[in-house]
Structure formats: C-alpha cells, structure tokens
Amino acid sequence: MTSSLFGMAGYTGWVLLLLLTIIAYRGFMVMSFKRKADAWTRGGETQDGPLLKRICDALSNSLETAPLFFGIILLANVSDQSAVTDGLAMTYVGARIIQSVSHIISVHHLMIFVVRFPAFLAQVAILIWWSLSLTSVI
C-alpha cells in the first residue's frame, strides 16, 4: 500500500472516529430516555451542548474536503504517479486532524488564527501543489 493510500485510510478513520463519537452520544441520549430518536432532525433545533456541536462541525468540515483529497490520491495512484502524493499524504491527514481537534477544543479567535486556519491553509496548499504536479504544470 502506498503512503497516499495509507493516508486515505487514516483520513477515513478520522472521519469514522468523529462519526462514531456523535453516534455514541446520540445513542446514549436515546437509550437513557433523555432525548427522542427524532431529536436531531435536519434543520431543527437541538439541545446538544457546544462540544457536540463543534464535533458535528468538525465532521462536516472533514467531509467537505474529503472528495478533493480522495480524488487527487486516487488520480495519482491510477496514473502511476503516487510518488507525487506519497511524501505529503500523512502531512495532509495530520493537518486535517489538527484542524478538527482545534475546532473541537475551542472556537476562540486566537485558536482559529494560530492553529485552525493555518492547518486548513496547509491542506489547501498541498492540494494545489499536488494538482499542479500531477498535471505537469510544475
């Protein structure tokens, strides 16, 4: 397995961890009769605390960029150019996890400015670098 494909597995694992955290919380709330199973209808108001909302937001953020990451990794692998993405694949996943964890920990402007946004920019820069490298622009 290439480093890039291992990175895809890591990214998928991270998304699953966030998802399972939400499922565990909601399952506990339903099974303990603290909430009805329909308490989380799309667009409806929830009574969840700010931590769970931040976990849900981190999951949404992770899912928003997943197609870009997976698409480039798959393109590199099917075109026998995985060497382009192998070097930075785990760095990308690490930046994704840092962004998510900082989002979960705090939404304070300093956390956003010093940790979360730079981690996001690192991901964007890597995606751009890969895209240009795979298309032989650079």
Image: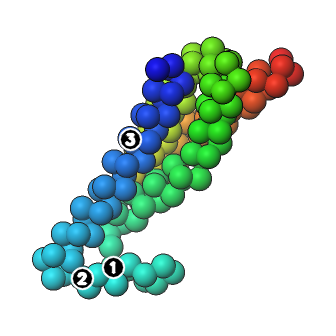
Are the residues flagged by discs 3 and 1 in contact, CB closer than 8 Å?
A: no
Are the residues flagged by discs 1 and 2 in contact, CB closer than 8 Å?
A: yes
What amino acid is labelled 1 in the image? Gln
Q: Quadrant of residue 14?
A: top left
| Residue at disc 1, secondary structure | loop
What amino acid is labelled 3 in the image? Gly
Are the residues flagged by discs 3 and 2 in contact, CB closer than 8 Å?
A: no
Kindly identify the residue that appears in the image at 38 percent across and 78 percent down.
Answer: 40
- The disc, 3 or 2, on the residue closer to the chain's N-terminal end is 3
Kindly identify the residue that appears in the image at 33 percent across and 73 percent down.
Answer: 48
Where residue 47 is drawn, which disc sits there? 1
Image height check: is 74 above or below 47?
Answer: above
Q: Position of residue 107 (x, y in %)?
A: 46, 55
Q: CA distance from mark 3 to mark 2?
A: 28 Å
Q: Position of residue 24 (x, y in %)?
A: 24, 61
Residue ID for mark 3: 13
Kindly identify the residue that appears in the image at 59 percent across and 53 percent down.
Answer: 64
Q: CA distance from mark 1 to mark 2?
A: 9 Å
Q: Nearer the viewer, mark 3 or mark 1?
A: 3
